[in-house]
Image (cartoon, rainbow, N blue to C red):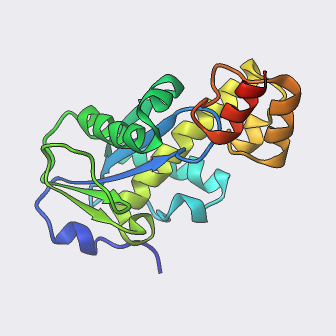
């Protein structure tokens, strides 16, 4: 069953959906998106980004960003290493909502934790599979981050970021051992930290 508007209907407008991409990778930023859907112009096919192929996500990203209010928050590797990934994710979500430039009536956030912000908000476990606004945000965040990692692949070839997007696949871990650590690797993450100690 696809995500619905049942959560949005319970709260005052504008209702914002928020989700992130990139908590788990060994390299690259964490990216969050905030989306306000116009219920009269909702693109068909919105779903949890993990359930969609890359081609479908790209097409939906284009349609969502044409008709919805949206903002993106990015936290880079230096900030992740300084703050830790949990606090970096909360910061990315705060930046995404701030980028909307409006005061939300309610923010619906995927997961079980909320940033420390002034906005009325609700955390929804598996929200990207249940709430259409959060699902839309998951698509915008995922496509934004994937595009960044594909661009970084050209700068730092050999790690397979075009395919693995910085996640710790066997290919990526093998390349880390062979090529070493780049400025885009998260030194606070155990596989990268262990390699740095060995150098």
- Residue at 19% from the left image edge and 70% from the top image edge: 9
Q: Is residue 123 above or below residue 94?
A: below
The number of numbered discs placed on residues in the rendered structure image is 0
- Residue at 49% from the left image edge and 51% from the top image edge: 139
- Residue at 71% from the left image edge and 25% from the top image edge: 196
Q: Position of residue 92 (x, y in %)?
A: 37, 37
Q: Is residue 198 above or below residue 118?
A: above
| Left-right relation of 176 to 79 | right
Q: Position of residue 34 (x, y in %)?
A: 33, 46
Residue 90, image quadrant: top left
Front one among 147 and 189: 189
Q: Position of residue 72 (x, y in %)?
A: 38, 36
Query: Residue most toward the front?
Result: 197
Q: Is residue 139 visible?
A: yes
Q: Is residue 42 visible?
A: no
Quarter of the image for the C terminus: give it: top right
Q: Is residue 95 above or below residue 105?
A: above
- Residue at 61% from the left image edge and 34% from the top image edge: 147
| Left-right relation of 72 to 38 | right
Q: Is residue 103 above or below residue 111?
A: above
| Left-right relation of 52 to 85 | right
Front one among 173 and 34: 173
Q: Position of residue 22 (x, y in %)?
A: 54, 44
Residue 176, image quadrant: top right
Front one among 187 and 47: 187
């Amino acid at each position: 069953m696809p995500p619905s508007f049942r959560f949005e209907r319970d709260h005052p407008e504008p209702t914002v959906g928020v989700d992130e991409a990139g908590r788990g990778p060994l390299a690259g930023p964490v990216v969050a998106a905030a989306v306000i859907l116009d219920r009269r112009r909702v693109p068909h096919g919105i779903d949890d980004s993990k359930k969609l192929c890359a081609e479908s996500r790209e097409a939906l990203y284009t349609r969502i960003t044409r008709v919805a209010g949206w903002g993106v928050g990015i936290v880079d590797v230096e900030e992740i290493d300084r703050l830790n990934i949990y606090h970096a994710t909360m910061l990315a979500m705060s930046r995404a909502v701030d980028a909307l430039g409006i005061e939300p009536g309610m923010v619906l956030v995927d997961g079980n934790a909320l940033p420390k912000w002034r906005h009325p908000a609700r955390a929804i476990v598996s929200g990207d599979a249940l709430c259409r606004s959060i699902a839309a945000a998951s698509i915008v965040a995922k496509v934004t981050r994937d595009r960044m990692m594909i661009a970084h692949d050209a700068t730092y070839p050999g790690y397979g970021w075009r395919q693995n997007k910085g996640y710790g696949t066997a290919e990526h871990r093998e390349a880390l051992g062979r090529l070493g650590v780049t400025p885009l690797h998260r030194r606070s993450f155990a596989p990268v930290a262990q390699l740095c100690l060995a150098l």
